[in-house]
Image (spheres, rainbow, N blue to C red):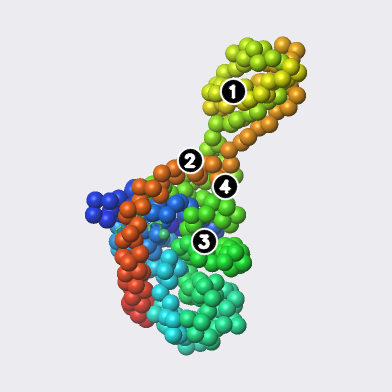
Amino acid sequence: MITVEHLTKCYGDFTAVDALSFEIEEGHVYGFLGPNGAGKSTTMNIMTGCLSATAGHIKIDGFDIFEEAAKAKRLIGYLPEQPPLYMNESPVEYLKFVGEAKGFRGAELTEQIQEVIRQTRIEEVKNKRISDLSKGYRQRVGIAQALLGRPKVIILDEPTVGLDPIQIIEIRDLIKELGKKHTVIFSSHILSEVQTICDQILIISKGKLIAFDEPKHLEKSLLSPGEITITADASPEEVEKILDSLEHMTEFKIQESEREYTVFQVKTDQKDVYDTARRIFFLFAEQKKALLEMTLKKANLEDIFLELTENGSGQTETQNGGEDLPDIAENESCQSDTKESGVDQL
Ligand code: ADP
Ligand code: MG
């Protein structure tokens, strides 16, 4: 559906997106996960034809986003980080304007507007001024305009940012709903959000793709070294002697020792922490020493995310000062691009 090849974007001598390559298949919900400044918005702006690239290629259903922009853009609905909503208009007026810009007229336009209003559940506010709507409703209006034209792919940039907890849940449910009919790509810097909604996660840090997999596989393939806490019916000296023959042990620490037992921790560089636990069990059993308790601490996706993106946001702090204004400018030019290509299609 979408092929991104060696996508690179430089702002002066700063590389915001660094040789990114990935493929998006039809019918899934993809999450772009990464700390602020990772390059998510830049990538999305380029994928949607709103921003030029320094190098690389993007194809949307076979159409080159740079060379066949109008055809490629028609397949995508985009909600930018700062959606260009017209505050004095009502959702219906705004959707009419965007629908016309996308090339729809008359009964078809009316039907499309009714459909997206239904899909995003904004019936009750459809005639109010957008400036009077809550942030949650405004975000729905933004999603509604992205849905006009029934695009195959919906791209949403941080759709839940700035919303209250209830609105966040509602938008997440809406994204899941959209995922049944569209290929959805959305960005977030919140791991749990991506984990619950997406069936594929792309972790981006400092403009690079550092992981791309299903949530459950990510946990498995990137599992950090495991840690096991054990209580054994043995003295610290006996414990140490027995563990002498344990391979792949990276750390060993006695936590507590009483006359009856010793509590100790073992860290291993083996991905399968269960296998290490099993080997420890048998080493102690061979010496006829009982294990009284064993607790396995497995790394979860949160740990993996933190580890992979470590220092990811720090480096970009100084760059972030200039982030907002240029972004708005890009989005505005995006909007007028869409209008133009919409008119061209007439
Ligand atoms: P994210 O969406 O993941 O937070 P962005 O794609 O917005 O990240 O930004 C990636 C990096 O590029 C950041 O360091 C940001 O400051 C920088 N950047 C974004 N837009 C511009 C711009 N127009 N000019 C200069 N630097 C920019
Ligand atoms: Mg962003």
Q: Which of the four quarters of the rendered structure image does ligand 1 lie in?
A: bottom left
Q: Earlier in the sequence, mark 4 or mark 3?
A: 3
193, above or below 79, in the image: above
Q: Which residue position is annotated with label 4?
A: 215
Which tag, 3 or 1, sits closer to the chain's start? 3
Residue holding disc 1: 253
The residue nearer to you, when weighing 99 against 67, is 99
Task: Estimate the x, y position of residue 176 in percent, counting from the top left.
Answer: 59, 62
- The residue positioned 76% from the left and 18% from the top of the image is 260
Q: At x 54% / y 51%, what residue is drawn?
A: 191
Separation (CA) of disc 1 from disc 4: 32 Å
Residue at which label 2 appears: 307
Rendered location of residue 193, percent (x, y): 56, 56
User: Which kind of residue does numbered mark 3 sit on?
Assistant: Thr
Distance from label 3 to label 2 (Cα)? 29 Å
Question: Can residue 54 be seen?
Answer: no
Looking at the image, is mark 1 or mark 4 earlier in the sequence? 4
- Residue at the spot of label 3: 183
Give the spatial CA distance, label 4 vs label 3.
Answer: 17 Å
Q: Residue 101's spot in the image, x, y percent? A: 39, 80
